[in-house]
Image (cartoon, helix red, strand yellow):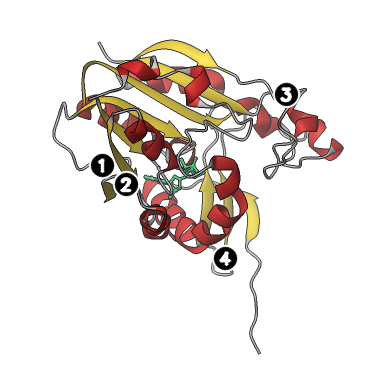
Amino acid sequence: MIHEYEPEATRRATGEAESSRASRGWWDRNADEYQTEHGAFLGDDRFVWGPEGLDEADAALLGPASGLEGLDVLEIGAGAAQCSRWLAAQGARPVALDLSHRQLQHALRIGGGVPLVEADATALPFADGSFDLACSAYGAVPFVADPVRVMREVRRVLRPGGRWVFSVTHPVRWAFPDEPGPEGLSVAASYFDRTPYVEQDESGRAVYVEHHRTIGDRVRDVVAGGFRLVDLVEPEWPAWNTQEWGGWSPLRGHLIPGTAIFVCERD
Ligand SMILES: C[S@@+](CC[C@H](N)C(=O)[O-])C[C@H]1O[C@@H](n2cnc3c(N)ncnc32)[C@H](O)[C@@H]1O
């Protein structure tokens, strides 16, 4: 008889090693389902910042698309490297990095020739000053215990004047149940509770981890990492987007923010 164990969802402390191990395992096990479910929305070679569907082709948070030609760009937590493929189409030289082997296998399946690197965002395997730009659409930052470490690593591998743009779950959402319907509209937890969200197996081992930071925490992380924050974008839910993505939905999206995008620069 096969027992399918349903992980227990809880809030508890978890450190860097356990978070990294849990993320790698979870994304390896769930990459196929993630790409099947969201691949069409993401598009093989579009750069989408989050479930609202904000497209870099319109938002130009990395700068005008016409200025991307010839730039070295690091995409962190790239998944199947959809964003990197868009960057390559603009003439940039992207490198797509992800912790999950299975996510990168999807990048290979889609193709396009973008260089792929399997590594943890907290220890980037690149020399100082290797890139002009760095970006991340919901990759790595929400999942690491010490985001300042990621900021410092990104700063190290960027050249002076380089831009670092990353999106995460909007911190306000942590106060609400992660449900797309009306039940997701009532405050159920403290926004100020930084205790990580953890799913754990029968033996108490974390199998999925997300780390909550308030907006103020994220600003302080950016500054502690050596960046200037030049914009904080909260995409509004557009009328054309009728699609739900987990707890992100048109209903909630019209009322509360779902994504926060931090636009940072290195002096
Ligand atoms: C929500 S997915 C986003 C993927 C892609 N950017 C997209 O928009 O579809 C998060 C990605 O971050 C990766 N990730 C999580 N923790 C990471 C870490 N510490 N270092 C590098 N990648 C990580 C996961 O493997 C996963 O592919």
The type of residue carrying mark 1 is Ala
Establish whether ligand 1 lies closer than 8 Å to the Cβ of label 4.
Answer: no
Q: Are marks 2 and 1 in contact (CB under 8 Å)?
A: yes
Mark 3 belongs to which amino acid?
Answer: Ile
Specify which label sits upstream in the sequence, 4 or 1. Answer: 1
Q: Residues within 10 Å of mark 4 (few under 14, many from 20)?
A: some
Answer with mark 2 or mark 4, whichever residue precedes in sequence: 2
240 horizontally vs 66: left or right: right
Q: Position of residue 48 (x, y in %)?
A: 52, 33
Q: Amino acid at mark 4?
A: Asp
Whichever of callouts 2 and 3 sits on the residue coming sooner in the sequence is 2
Q: Which residue is mark 3?
A: 256
- Choose top left, top right, bottom left or bottom right for residue 176: top right
Q: Quadrant of residue 82?
A: top left
- Residue 74's x, y, as percent? 30, 34
Report the side of 237 relative to 163 (left or right): right
Q: Identify the residue at horizontal 34%, vertical 19% (top origin).
A: 224
Cα distance in 3D space between marks 2 and 4: 23 Å
